[in-house]
Amino acid sequence: MKANVTYWLDETADRLPDKVAFADEKKEITFSALRAQAMALATRMLERGLFKKPVVVYLEKGVDVLVSFMGAAYSCNFYSPIDIEMPASRVNKILEVLQPALVVTTAELKTVFEQYDYHGEYLLFGEAAAMPADEQIVDAARARGIDTDLLYVLFTSGSTGVPKGVTINHRSVIDYIDWVTETFDITEEDSFGNQAPFYFDNSILDIYSTIKSGATTYIIPKNLFAQPVPLLEYLKEKKINTIFWVPSALIVVAKLKAFRNVDLSDTLHRVLFCGEVMPNRQLNIWRKFLPDVLYANLYGPTEITDACTYYIVDREFGDDEPLPIGIPMANTDILVLNDKNEPVAGDEVGELCVRGTSLSMGYYNNPEKTREAFVQNPLNPCVPETIYRTGDLVKYNDHGEIVYLSRKDFQIKHMGHRIELGEIETAVSSLEEISLCCCLYDEKHQKIVLFIEEELDKSYINERISKLVPEYMLPNKVIMLDKMPINANGKIDRVKLKECL
Ligand code: AMP
C-alpha cells in the first residue's frame, strides 16, 4: 500500500527514467532527474531535522517548483506554494497562519522574501538540488510517514481578510489521482498542457497524473492565455492531447474562434475543466470545431482535493441550458441537504456536501473556520463522521445528475479565481478615507463592483489596495453613492445595491 505520493515517482523513474516529466519555457526535467533532485532536497530538509513541517516554496512557476514539492513530500514535510506576485501584506498573513519551518527559494528571491515577517531558515534551490542525496535517510523518513500525513496546504481567499490554508494529505491525492487516471485512461502516451497555477487545486490533476502514469506535462507560458491562436499553436507543436483548464481559459479561445486558424482535431483528445461554471454557449463552439474530443465537467472545491463530481459530456445542449456537474466520483459520497439538513427530494434545491477520503483535514491553524465548514454528518448520529459543506446550491435534474445553481454566501469565481468579496471589502475598509463600502459581483458582465460613499476614483483605490490583495481581486468598477442603503437589520442592503448593477 502506498502511504506517500513519491512512491509513484520511484516507480515511474525506474520504468521511464529518460522520459520528460515536466517542461517549462526554460527547461525540462526527466523522471530520473526529478527523482534525484527531489531526493537531494529531501535530504537537506531531513538533515535540518525537518519532519512533518510546513515548507514554503517561493519560486517562479516552473519545473523547479515541482521538484521542491516532491522534495517536501519525500522528506514527509508538506509544501505550501506562495505566488511570487502576491502582495507583501497577504504573504505576511499566510506566514502568520502557516509558521513555516523552511522556505525554498533562489538567492535572488530570498532578498524579496527577507522583507516579509519570516526569520526562519532558507534552502536555496539550485545549490540544494545539485548536492548528492542520501536515499537511506529519505527512505527511513518515508517509512515513518503515514498516508494521513499532510502533503500540502493551499491558501484560498478568506472572508475576514485572512487567507484559509486548506490542508490535504497523501491519501486524498492518491485516491483522487487513482480515479482520474482510471476514468480518463491516462498513460505515458499522454501529454498535459498545464494552465492552473500551482497554488490552485486544479494543478493537482496535471502534476500527480503525470507522476503516476509517466505522462508529460508542459507548463504553458501564462501570456499565451491572452493569445488564443499562439496558444492553440503551442498545443499542436507540443502534441498536447489533454488539457484541464478553468472555463475562463476555454471561453477566451471560443470567443475568438481561434480554431479557424489552428486545426487540433488530430492533437487534442480530452478537454477537462473545473473551477467555475462552463457555459454551454462557449462549450458548443469547442464541440462544433472539435467534435471527437472527450469533454468533462469536473466540480469541486480545494477542500475536497480538487473535484468530487464529474460529468462526461454525452448529449447535445442548447446554448442556454446548464451543463450538469454530474455524479459523484468513485469512493465519494455527495449529500444534497435542504435547510432542515435532510436529503432533498425531487428537484428541491439544497447545499452540496461531501463525504469521503478526499476531504481536507481542515484549515491550517484555524479551528473556528474548520468547525464551520467541516461538520458532523447530520444523517449519521451514531459515529463521528465529517462532511464538508461546500456552500454551493445545487439540484438534481431528470437524468439524476447534479446541476450547480449558485452560492449561498459571498464567495465568487472571477476569471477562474476563488474570491471572498469580504476580503476585498476588508482591504478597502483599511483606507482611512473610506467610511462604508460593499462589494458585489456583476455575473453578467463579469465585473467586481465596489460601492463607496466617498469621491475616490478606481485607480486611486486600486493602487492603494494592490498592496493588500492580488491583482485579480481589484474592483473592475467603482460606484459612488450619496448614502449606502441600509436594510431593516441595520446592515448594508445588498439587494438594493444589486439593482444598481
Ligand atoms: P476552488 O476551491 O478554487 O476550486 O473553488 C471551488 C468553488 O468553485 C466551488 O465551491 C464552486 O462554487 C465553484 N466550482 C468549481 N467547479 C465548478 C463547476 N464545474 N461548475 C460550477 N462551479 C464550480
Image (cartoon, grey):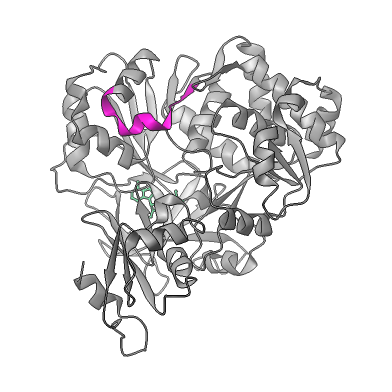
Q: Residue at x 31, y 18 (%)?
A: 233
Which of the 4 image quadrants contains residue 435?
bottom left
The residue most toward the top is 18
Q: Would you say residue 336 is visible in this rendering?
A: no
Image label count: 0
Q: Would you say residue 489 is visible in this rendering?
A: yes
Q: Residue at x 65, y 21 (%)?
A: 34
Q: Is residue 379 above or below residue 120?
A: below
Side (left or right) of 8 relative to 178: right
Q: Is residue 425 above or below residue 130?
A: below
- The one nearer the camera, 484 or 162, is 484
Residue 23 x/y as whole percent: 52, 20
Residue 352 x/y as whole percent: 40, 59
Side (left or right) of 349 relative to 6: left
Q: Residue at x 71, y 36 (%)?
A: 72
Instruction: Provide the residue span drawn in magenta.
Output: 217-229
Q: Quadrant of the C terminus?
A: bottom left
Q: Please check the rendered image and state whether residue 12 is part of the magenta-colored stretch, yes or no.
A: no
Residue 305 x/y as whole percent: 52, 45
Residue 460 x/y as whole percent: 38, 62
Q: Please check the rendered image and state whether residue 225 is part of the magenta-colored stretch, yes or no.
A: yes
Q: Quadrant of the N terminus?
A: top right
Side (left or right) of 168 relative to 373: right
Q: Is residue 338 above or below residue 93?
A: below
Which of the 4 image quadrants contains residue 228?
top left
Which of the 4 image quadrants contains residue 257?
top left
- The one nearer the camera, 338 or 198, is 198
- The one nearer the camera, 481 or 269, is 481
